[in-house]
Amino acid sequence: MHPSYLVALLAMLCAVYMVIGYPLLLAKVNWRRRPPVAKDPAFQPTVTIVVAVYNGASQVVRKLEVLRGLSYPADKYNIVIVSDGSTDATDELVKKFAAEHTDGAPISLLRAPRGGKAAALNLAMATLTGEIIFLTDVRQPLEPSALSHLAANFADPTVGAVTGELVLLRGDSGEQADMDLYWRYEIWARTRQSEIDSLFNTTGCIYAIRRSLVARLPPDTLTDDAVMPLRAFFQGYRVVFDPAAIAYDYPAVSGTEFRRRFRTLAGLWQVFARHPALFTSSRMRIHFLSHKFSRIALPWTLLAVFGATLAMPGSPWRSLLLALELLPVALAAGNTFVPVGFKLKRLSSPARTFLVMNAAALCAVFVFVLPATWIWKPTTTDKAVAGTK
């Protein structure tokens, strides 16, 4: 047998496991579970809310209104806004809001030289006073009960960090609908992993962590929502998911999903390189390899399948395999030309999203040669829905 057949078979089996096999195992296997989180709604520790923002003048007042409107005792939390070298009216708006609203949770403004989110968070660390640190972003609104739900989980001494659910708005068609489908799977997987033991990362706009576990981030960190929770995880704490704590996000502008995924997956490469224990001594190693590492590994596996197929001796089987492998690429490439509502769109649109996500995963390896300031760019959202939640 030509060795290319064996390479193609092994690579194909790996890809099938990543896409289909692991979700089935996660759903069907009776995994050994940790006891349920002892969440106590009456537990109300002190909290410092930290928001790092760059040029957020169009959103920061609304975010402050949301944070002041949280259903949490005003004397139990304070708000720290870190302006990451903003050049618009962000700083002035925060100062004005704080001066005009003195009857609620205290608001303070820190100004950092432009250096990215990690550097801004590092500046805030010297000012943290709460027992719990709640990190959120300027863009996403929160349910009023979000902080109460997050805090209640820390009544369980085994919990080191908690993340909530990000609800994507208006994902009913096209690129955003396909991303919604992926996100629904992600939420389901997080729910299962949290029940089994622990997550590996959180959602950046809605997560909380014990102050005792917070430490300075490397300045070039792209995914603080992975690095901070891992510190809790490696110290034996659980990182859990609470779907009752809800944030909302708006659709990304069409065509910007590649950069968004590229940034996230580049951050994953950083995490893998800086935390090799995930591969060797993690108590959730099988889930890490099958769920997180597979995001980076899948496109390389698919390339291995394609390369092995090209290397096969000429035959009708080789031609058929090449046609089947290139069909999703052809569907993705032609998606722009398929009219909305046309039945083929149900295949071409998911194929395009799958191709974009895997292309971003391939390119993410360049995180080791590109400066973090180039990779970290603000997400552009659909302004038409910015006021819907």
Image (cartoon, rainbow, N blue to C red):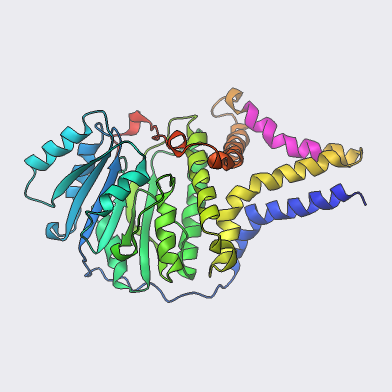
| Residue 329 on the magenta segment | yes
Left or right: 104 in relation to 118: left
Q: Nearer the viewer, residue 375 or 200?
A: 375
Q: Position of residue 227 (x, y in %)?
A: 43, 55
Quadrant assignment for the C terminus: top left
Q: Nearer the viewer, residue 277 or 70?
A: 277
Left or right: 237 in relation to 62: right
**In the picture shown, does residue 261 fall above or below 241?**
above
| Residue 367 on the magenta segment | no
Left or right: 225 in relation to 189: left
- Identify which residue is drawn at 24% across, 64% down: 131
Give the total number of marks visible in the rendering. Answer: 0
- Residue 309: quarter of image: top right
Q: Position of residue 35 (x, y in %)?
A: 42, 76
Q: Position of residue 388 (x, y in %)?
A: 30, 37
Left or right: 89 in relation to 344: left
Q: Position of residue 81 (x, y in %)?
A: 23, 44
Q: Evaluate whether residue 26 shows in this view.
A: no
- Residue 84: quarter of image: top left
Q: Nearer the viewer, residue 321 or 1?
A: 1
Q: Which residues are magenta?
A: 321-334
- Identify which residue is drawn at 32% across, 67% down: 153
- Identify which residue is drawn at 38% across, 31% down: 382
